[in-house]
Each structure stands twice: as C-alpha cells, then as structure tokens.
Amino acid sequence: MSATGVPTTPAPLNPNERKDKIGKYFVPTPDRMDRVMAIRMMQGGVVALVLAGALALAGLPVLGVLAAVAAIGALLVPGWVRLGNYRLDYSRAEPKASDDQVDATLNADLVATAADAMKRFELEDSDLDLHAEDVRPKVVDPGMTDPEGPLVLIAPTLKARHRLGDDRHRRFSEYTVAVLCPGRHHLAVLTCELNVVTGKRAKNATFEYHYDHISAVHTKGGSGAELRLGAVPGFSTLPFSPSFLELEIAATGGASVVIPTEVRHTRGPLLTRPSTVERVLPALRRLLRREQRGGGQG
C-alpha cells in the first residue's frame, strides 16, 4: 500500500530468491506452540536438576542422581531435540513468498512465455488479429500486465502441489501454459509446462494451422479429481472438487491440439496475464468465421 492509499503491485521475485521463497510457499510453517512446549520442557528439566542437586546436598545422593537422570532423559534432551526439530522445520518453511509475490512472479513468467512464443513464430503485435486485451477484463494498474500480445491460457498440471493462500485463493506449483497467436492467415499455438518454483519451462511444443484447415474449436470438460492429491497438508482447507475445462482445436486431416485451459477456482487478483476460456472461445470463433469467409486482410 502506497502513502496515498493506492495498492501497489509487488515486484516479481528475482531468480536468486524465487526458488527458495516460492518453494517455501508450499511448505507449512510449524506451529509456534511446538517451540513453546520445547522451551518449557527444557525449563522444567533445569528446575528438576536444581531439585536433584538439593536432594544430593540434603544427604539423599541416590534420589538426587535418579532425579537428575530423569530430568535429563525425560525433559532436557527431548526438549532440546524438539526445539532443534522446530528450528529445522521453520528454516524449511520461512521466509516464504507472499500471495502477491507468487502471483506477480507467475505473471512475469507468463509475459515472458508469450514474448518467447511471438519470437519463435516470428510475429509482431501488429500481426495479431486478436490481442490479450480483447479477451480479458481491463485492469486497474496497466503496469500489472502487457495489454497487447497473444492470448494466454493456463491450468495446473495433475502433479502440481497446491494450497490456499492467506487471501483464500488457491495457488499451484506447476501449470500447463498455452499461448495462442491468431495471426492474419493462421493460428500459431505454443504449449509448455511452467514450474512456478524454478521458473523453468518443459515439454515445449508448437502448432500452426491455416485458418482454412481448422475444422472445429470447442471445449470439453474433464474430471480433475486426481489434482486433489497435490493438496499440501498443514494449510487452511476449503472444499475442492476440481474439474478441467479443455480447449480442443481440430484441423482437417485429423490433426488436433488439446489444451487443458483451466480448473474451476478463483485466481489471485494480481494474476492478470491469463485469459479465460469463456472470453477466448467466442472471440476465436468469430475470428475463424470471418477468416474462413474470406474477411481477413491479406
């Protein structure tokens, strides 16, 4: 929040800190009561040792030794081990990225992926018949995303870990990304898997279809029940019954590309780069009808 009361957009995490902080985002912070209990056990052990010394000084050395052994074995050592485990678990979980930092970093990754797709297909913004701003709600802060560029769709992979953020939005560790570049004469598509923790992309694939060769564009629903297995224990929970929505682009001759486009869940407010199928599909169909009727410009 700025001094004027206007929300500020957090900067994406740099490569040196993202793997650590976003990795820890998906690791639950240990309960502080574990630390409190460990310290109390050690304090109790110290008190018991003092009592053991008092017994020895009072002429009861055997009882003093037994009390000292009990204090060390039952309180001091277990408390020390418990405190060490807490500190180790805490170092594995903190400091973690904030919800907004995760969104901003993913947003930057998607902007970079879209730019790479345009470069790979040798396209400029002026070559596109549809831009991101045509199929996405307007954003308050223009600096949060690029208004032009191709269309971007995302969905978590089935092996992604996920958790609810403090803002109750669910975030995933890995996404399937599809970049759609509707040019003047053809539709170019790049797909890949994006690891949010490392920023690395894998399974890159490209497809290019002339508009006259596209026979159908439609959506297909599918179960995402397997995605529930990736829920990280130790975080707040809400009922989660995921279902996939896939976008299929079929071409003459049997070629097709199926894009897992989204899972039904609310996204963080700063994750502005991706479009949604509800906005992309009608716009894409209108473009195809126009191009296939010969309405495109040469």
Image (spheres, rainbow, N blue to C red):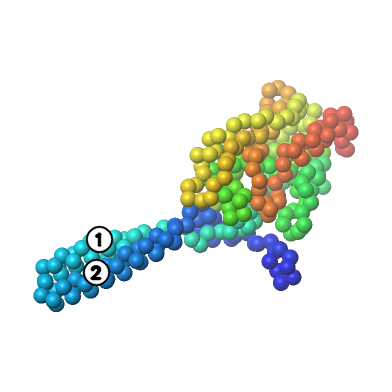
**Is residue 124 visible in the rendered structure shown here?**
no
Which quadrant does the C terminus fall into? Answer: top right
As rendered, which of 208 and 268 lies closer to the eye?
268
Q: Is residue 268 left or right of residue 284?
A: left
The residue located at (62%, 35%) in the rendering is 243
Q: Is residue 288 left or right of residue 243?
A: right
As rendered, which of 285 and 82 lies closer to the eye?
82
As rendered, which of 155 and 82 lies closer to the eye?
82
Q: Amino acid at mark 2?
A: Ala
How far separated are the C-alphas under marks 2 and 1? 10 Å
Which quadrant does the N terminus fall into? Answer: bottom right
Q: Seen from this angle, which residue lies furthest top?
A: 253
The residue located at (74%, 65%) in the rendering is 6
Mark 2 = which residue? 48
As rendered, which of 192 and 231 lies closer to the eye?
231
The residue located at (88%, 38%) in the rendering is 297
Q: Quadrant of residue 280?
A: top right
Q: Position of residue 270 (x, y in %)?
A: 68, 54
Q: Which mark is residue 74?
A: 1
Q: Amino acid at mark 1?
A: Ala
Q: Is residue 297 above or below residue 92?
A: above
**Is residue 208 visible in the rendered structure shown here?**
yes
